[in-house]
Amino acid sequence: MATAKTRTAAQLMLAPSVIALLIWMIVPLSLTLYFSTLNYNLFNPGETPFIGLTNYTYFLSDPAFFTALRNTLTLVMGVLIITVGGGILLALLLDQVFYGVNIVRLLVIAPFFVMPTVAALVWKNMMMNPVAGVIGQFLNFTGIGAIDWFSNAPLTAIIIIVAWQWLPFSTLILLTALQSLSEDQREAAEMDGAGFLSIFWYITLPHMARAITVVILIQTIFLLSIFAEIYVTTSGGPGLQTTNLPYLVYNMALLQFDVGGASAGGIVAVVLANIVAFFLVRLIGKNLEA
């Protein structure tokens, strides 16, 4: 009886937070669904006739949607390859004992705490500027020649900026997993004559598998909504070369003033993100069970 009363009391105490969270989520989603069925244009906000699924048909048949979807997937995959691969290498390096290792670990993690807008501005003006940027100066010094990143390779530039921000997160998670690896396994493998590559492939990497899947899941969810870096550096251009789904929705809402079409695009983006998250969660669940 006491247990039932305790459970009821706990549920009553949690109820306000749960209700507030549901309202916080359901109200914006409901309004977005409602606006997506209207011909709602900011040039004529007084007339918003109901048009059903026309906005969805228009959005899904727009060539810009397929370009934005391709850019979104390219951005996510490019950043994941750099952050997971680089995170493993940095974790292996920072797991060693050397003078100043704690300071190096702090410096490696520091970029994760830089705001996306600030990071994008720093990379745009101080690093990737073809005239005064550090990278351009270095390439000129080596005789290769400076690259106008945001004109010739804009999506690659965005991938580099975002990867720089997320690499510390990946490194931190993978380093934590690596430090939980038993030294007895390494020493036993070394005594049996295994080299560094064999130890890494058969012992270290399988031990880090769960951490790698968690990094991929968390980063993918956030990378699907990248916006600030694109807005500050390229504004989705040149053309549509760096336009991803979030920026396409922004473009339709605040540049084309089509609130109905942008709402439909937002719902499509949410559905696609949930599909990706669903399969990633299933993948991680199988990995954890194994």
Image (tube, rainbow, N blue to C red):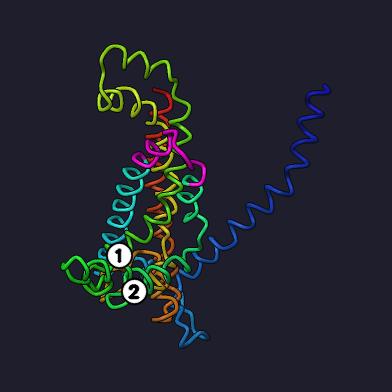
Q: Secondary structure at mark 1?
A: helix
Residue at 30% over, 65% down: 157
Q: Position of residue 243 (x, y in %)?
A: 32, 68
In the picture shown, does residue 109 fall above or below 75?
Answer: above
Residue 273 covered by magenta stretch? no
Residue 259 left/right relative to 187: right
Residue 111 left/right relative to 153: right
Q: Position of residue 177 (x, y in %)?
A: 45, 32
Residue 72: name its quadrant: bottom left
The numbered mark at residue 252 is: none
Q: Quadrant of the N terminus?
A: top right
Identified by mark 1, the residue type is Ala
* Nearer to us: label 1 or label 2: 1
Q: Main secondary structure of the magenta part?
A: helix
Q: Name the residue carrying label 1.
A: 157
Q: Position of residue 56 (x, y in %)?
A: 36, 66
Q: Which residues are magenta?
A: 88-103
Q: Secondary structure at mark 2?
A: loop
Pointer 1 or 2: first along the chain: 1
Q: Name the residue carrying label 2.
A: 234
Q: Quadrant of the C terminus?
A: top left
In the picture shown, does residue 156 fall above or below 110?
Answer: below
